[in-house]
Amino acid sequence: MSETALPKDDSRPVLDAPFDAPVDEIPPPAAVQRRGNGLAIIALLLGAAGVAVGGWGVWQVRHLQANNQQQLSQVQALNDQAQNLKLNEERLSARLAQLPPADELEARSRLVIQLQGDQQRLNQRLETVLGASRKDWRLAEAEHLLRLASLRLSALQDISSAQALVQGADEILREQNDPGAFAAREQVAKTLIALRSTEQPDRTGLFLRLGALREQVASLTELAPEYKDRGDSLLGLTTDGDGASRWAQWWDQISRYIRIDFNADKNVRPLLAGQSLSQVRLALSLALEQAQWAALNGQAAVYSQVLDEARDILKGNFNPDNAQSKVMLEQVAELSKQPVTVVTPDLTGTLSAVQGYLERRNVNAEDSVKPMAKPAANTAPEATP
C-alpha cells in the first residue's frame, strides 16, 4: 500500500475500519462523538449509584451499632432488675422463714375472730349501760346545781345566780319525764318562787356611791367663813377724799381676825385648820372605805356602824349650814338606810328531795339489773379462748 502525502487542511481522523469495508458503511464523526458522551454519562451514573450504595451501607452499619449499644444498655438494666428481684426474693424468704407455721396462724385467726365477737358484745352492753346512765348523769348534774345554788346563797347571798342554778336543775328534772320526780319538782318550784320574791341588794351601786363620797371629802375646806368686803359699809367711813388712810389699812388687817356672830346663843364650834383638818378628812375617808367593804361583803352591822361614825364626824367638825357638807350629810343618811344583806331561802329541803329521788331511782335500777346477772355469768366462759 503506497503512502501519499495529504495536505494539512484536508487532514481528517483515520477511522479504524476494515480495509475492504465499503465506503458507505463508515459512520460519520458526529455519531461517534454522541456515543462517547452517552457512555460517560452512564459511567457517572454508575459511579453515583456506587457512592449512594456505599453511603447507605455506612449508615446501616452505624444504625446497627447504635441498636447494639441500646440493646446492651437494656440488657444491663434487665440484669440490674433481675438482681434486685433476687434480693427481694431473698428478703421475702427470710421473712417467711420467721413467720409461724400454718397451724399457729390458724389458731391466731380463730382467736382474733373470737375477740371480735367479744368486743361486739361488750360494745352492745356498753351502749345499753350508757343509754341508761345518761339520765343518771343529768340527775347528778341537777343535784350539783342545787348544791352550788345553796353555796352561793350562804356565802355571797347572790339571789340572781342562785335563781339561775335552781332553774337549770328544774329543767333537768322536767327532761326526765318521770312521775317519780313530782315531789322533787314541787320543792324546786317552791324554791324558785321564794327566790323570785326576794329582792337582791344593790351592793355594787352602794360601793360606787360611797366611793364618790370619798372623793368629795378632800374638798371640804370651808370650815369657818372668812370676812369678805362686798361694799363700803365700814371701810368707806374711814377713808377721806385723797385715798386709803392709815385707819383703812388697819381695818383691812384686823377684819381678817375678828368675826361678829349675831347668833351667840348657839353652841360654839371649834375652828379646825392645818393638821387637824387633815386628820378629820382621813377619819371620814376611812369610815367611808369601811362602809364600802361592809357593803360588798354583806356585813350589815359594820355598815351601819361606820356610816353612823361618818355622820358624827360630819356633824361634829363641819358647819351644817355649808351646802357641801349638808349634801354629804344627807347622802350618808340616805345610804345608811339601804339594805346590804337579805334573808335568803333555805335550799336544804329541796336538795334532800332531789337526793331522795336519786336514791329511789338507783334502787329500782339495781332491782331491774339483778335478773340479768345470771345469763351474763353463763356467757362469760364462752368469751374466754
Image (cartoon, rainbow, N blue to C red):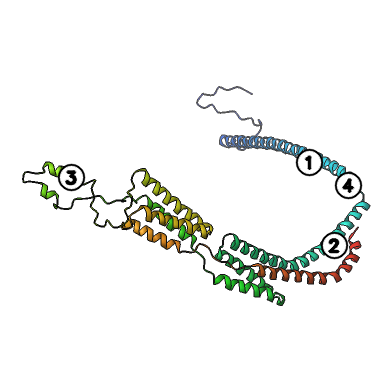
Q: Is residue 130 left or right of residue 108?
A: left
Q: Nearer the viewer, mark 2 or mark 4?
A: 2
CB-based contact (under 8 Å), mark 4 and mark 1: no
- Labels 2 and 3: the sequence-earlier one: 2
Residue located at (29% from left, 51% from top): 224
Tag 4: Cα neighbours inside 10 Å, few (<14), some, or many (≥20)? few
Q: Is residue 252 left or right of residue 75?
A: left
Q: CA distance from mark 2 to mark 3?
A: 114 Å
Residue located at (11% from left, 47% from top): 238
Mark 3, residue position: 252
Tag 3: Cα neighbours inside 10 Å, few (<14), some, or many (≥20)? few
Q: CA distance from mark 4 to mark 3?
A: 122 Å
Q: Position of residue 209 (x, y in %)?
A: 43, 58
Q: Is residue 352 above or below residue 213?
A: below
- Labels 1 and 2: the sequence-earlier one: 1
Q: Position of residue 381 (x, y in %)?
A: 91, 62
Callout 2, which amino acid? Gly
Mark 4, residue position: 99
Q: Nearer the viewer, mark 1 or mark 2?
A: 2
Q: Quadrant of the N terminus?
A: top right
Q: Nearer the viewer, residue 180 or 60?
A: 180
Callout 3, which amino acid? Asp
Q: Is residue 347 left or right of residue 281?
A: right
Q: CA distance from mark 1 to mark 3?
A: 125 Å
Q: CA distance from mark 2 to mark 4?
A: 26 Å
Callout 4, which amino acid? Leu
Circle 2 sits in a helix, a strand or a loop, which is it?
Answer: helix
Mark 2, residue position: 117
Q: Position of residue 66 (x, y in %)?
A: 71, 37
Callout 1, which amino acid? Gln
Circle 1 sits in a helix, a strand or a loop, which is it?
Answer: helix
Tag 2: Cα neighbours inside 10 Å, few (<14), some, or many (≥20)? few
